[in-house]
Amino acid sequence: MNIINKTYSLTILVCLFFISAYSQTELKNKIVDFSTMIPIESASIYIQNTTTGTISNADGKFVLLVPNTMENDTLVISSIGYKSFKILVKDFDNTEEVFLEEDIASLDEVLLVGEPRPKTANEIVLKMISKLPDNLPELPYLEKGFLRHKEQNKKEFKWLIESAITLYDSSAQSPAYKNLKINVDEMRKSYDLRDVDSLLAYTAYLKQNGNKSLRAKNLKRDTIQTASLVKAIKWNDIRTNGLKNLFIGKLNLLRNTKSPRALFGEHILDYHQFELDTVLVDNERKIYKIKISAGKDYIDLETKGIFDAGYIANGWLYVYWDTYAVKKIEYELIAASEAQKNRSKILFDTQVNHKLTVTYMEYDGKMYTNYISYETPKLVNVGSNTSKSKDKEAEQRAKDERYYKTTQEILFTEVILDPEKVETTLHSDWDSNIFSIKPYNKDFWDNYNTLLESEEDEKLIQDLTKRSSLFKD
């Protein structure tokens, strides 16, 4: 009887151990500028010396699930240009807003040093590129993260996808098309294609499959089977907004610098010019803030089957003073050639065709991708033709319905460097299609860190939920 009791007690202890090991604490709050009281968007919230973390949304709010085993670790809340906030996880107060104070380094003070340093922003950027082999991973690794893909006009979401993904990379300087893989592990919210008239996508799909002379105006929606239209929409989304395109294409600016036609490669100063704005502070480290502007040549993304040329660059680059590692890139491509300006105006009603933000986190001495936000206008033929309306209000309503954009956000929360785990995962099946339907695994999502939606997006999501159930069993 005693043996039975001891065995029973041991079983309880083992269960309690596993419950404790996998139980989590929810940290949530709002981050605010101390002087202006304005919410701070895209602040980093993470556990020191780990990759467990998240970022704040447009309202300055965040939610982070932290294993109870980390209760004695340090929570860091930081944003470029502010003093960092640090506290033990167990001491964090979910009821008190976090205020960050501005922290700017003196440019004159920073430049008065003994070691030779680049004198212009162009020279700083060239130095940054030369240091990429030192700052980016040179050994195979995995990253696990959360993807939110949303497509919307100004009135509503048309569809929303949320996935857990795994990224494999053999090294950050090898050819991406051969050495980078992406897998969709879990799906939370589903693909909703209703109310979308994509005759333009259908036309492109048919042309790709042999009908070169077809035009969208020659088609009528009621003559096309829904299944065929859905197939065309998915084909178009994969080629323009698929995950492989984002990571293997030119807009993965640091990853693909060795490509002969890389935007941040050998000919970077042909496509860009850089100007030093100031020196800021990020988590007690000095960081260059560098303005990105147009070079002498137009930029061409060389997207197959799409006129994706005739752009100039605009944005900001944040480079650490001490290591020349990149902390953040804010980058957009603006229509500049006459052909691209006309195309962008007619199809998208905007001149900004690609808008990219990437932040990096330091782990084990190397910089890994932390967060990606990529926005691009979407080619969808819906709504009324705005050019025929004489009523200004009606014209604006039609524009709000007609013109769409796609936004993809990716938050990476785990880096895996163990060679055995990397090798085992590499030899499993890989599927990067975010547009396929997968079962909804509630237990998985209850314990997974995701990006917190803004209040505006949450309302749009609720509106979409009324039209279609997002959680698929």
Image (cartoon, grey):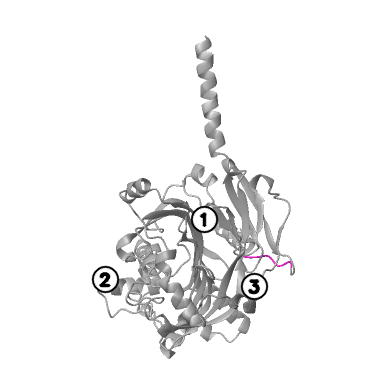
Q: Nearer the viewer, mark 2 or mark 3?
A: 3
Marks 2 and 3, how far apart at CA: 57 Å
Res 187 visible: yes
Q: In this figure, which residue is indicated by the disc labeled 3?
A: 105
Observer-side mark, 1 or 2, equals 2
Q: In which quarter of the image is residue 168?
A: bottom left
Query: In the image, which residues are magenta?
Result: 37-41
Amino acid type for the residue under numbered disc 2: Asn
**Separation of marks 1 and 2 at Cα, in angstroms:** 32 Å
The answer to whether marks 1 and 2 mark residues whose Cβ atoms lie closer than 8 Å is no
- The residue under label 1 is 468
In the image, taking residue 56 as reference, residue 128 lies left or right, namely: left
Q: Residues within 10 Å of mark 1 (few under 14, many from 20)?
A: some
Residue at left offset 69%, top offset 68%: 102
3D distance between C-alphas at marks 3 and 1: 51 Å
Callout in the foreground (3, 1): 3
Q: Is residue 95 left or right of residue 212?
A: right
Viewer can see residue 163:
no
| Three-letter amino acid code at the position of disc 3 | Ala
Q: Main secondary structure of the magenta part?
A: loop
Q: In this view, does 178 lie above or below 290?
A: above
Check disc 2 and report the residue beneath it.
209
Q: Count neighbours of disc 3 (C-alpha within 10 A) and say few if under 14, some if 14 to 19, many if 20 or more.
A: some
Horizontal side of 223 relative to 114 (left or right) equals: left
Marks 3 and 1 in Cβ contact (< 8 Å): no
- SS of the residue under disc 3: loop
Mark 3 / mark 1, whichever is N-terminal: 3
